[in-house]
Image (tube, rainbow, N blue to C red):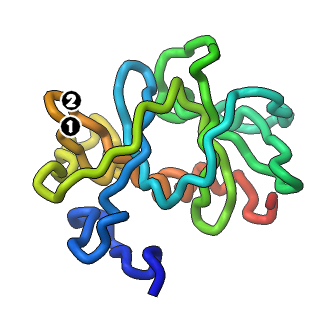
Amino acid sequence: MTLQQQRPNNVAKPPVTASDPAANEFLTFRLGGEEYGIDILKVQEIRCYDAITQIANSPGYIKGVINLRGIIVPIVDMRIKFNLAHASYDQFTVVIILTVAGRVMGIVVDGVSDVITLENEQMRQAPGLGSVIETEFIMGLGAVGERMLILIDIEKLMSGSDMGLIAPDLN
């Protein structure tokens, strides 16, 4: 059995299992002054932000596409997706290449922080904030020392109805 097969399908419950230590590992990145984490098993590579081909009439959060070793990869700007203030891209801006819902796609973030392992007791479910803030893409919060890490369910985020605009046959 592979690690992917051992992972729980329902991430609304605590996102880890004791039998799968890799499920506790997250790649952390910065975005708008906050720190986020995504499942390390979804990450293929981390690249510098460069040479993105813009696509006319695409949603604002889709920066364009890149050709990654013969695969056309859509690139999503997470600042725009999360309705954060615009920031200029700099030498720390990176594109994280992910495999999500069987597709290869990239996300633009302000910078990558670390790879961390969280124990079950370091993770909490996302608070219910009603209709004020959408938390459907937040699978939980992680406590790292004095910092709080927002754990993103990248599968739910990238598979949402608005993301259906990215055709699955692009790769």
> At 31% from the left edge and 72% from the top edge, which residue is drawn?
20
**In the image, is 76 to the left or to the right of 42?**
right
* Residue under label 1: 144
The x, y position of residue 116, in whole percent, is 33, 45
Mark 2 is on which residue type?
Answer: Arg
> At 45% from the left edge and 26% from the top edge, which residue is drawn?
31
Residue furthest to the left:
121
- Against 169, residue 113 (above or below) is above
> At 81% from the left edge and 35% from the top edge, which residue is drawn?
57
The x, y position of residue 103, in whole percent, is 67, 62
Disc 2 to disc 1: CB gap under 8 Å? yes
Front residue of this view, candidates 130 and 113: 113
- Against 43, residue 90 (above or below) is above
Residue furthest to the bottom:
1
Front residue of this view, candidates 32 and 23: 23
Marker disc for residue 129:
none
**In the image, is 63 to the left or to the right of 9?**
right
The x, y position of residue 99, in whole percent, is 61, 59
Please tell me whether mark 1 sits on a helix, a strand or a loop.
Answer: strand
The quarter of the picture where residue 32 lies is top left
The x, y position of residue 123, in whole percent, is 18, 51
The quarter of the picture where residue 142 lies is top left
> At 64% from the left edge and 68% from the top edge, which residue is drawn?
102
Crowding at mark 1 (Cα within 10 Å: few <14, some 14-19, many 20+):
few
Instruction: Quarter of the image for the C terminus: give it.
Output: bottom right
* Residue under label 2: 147
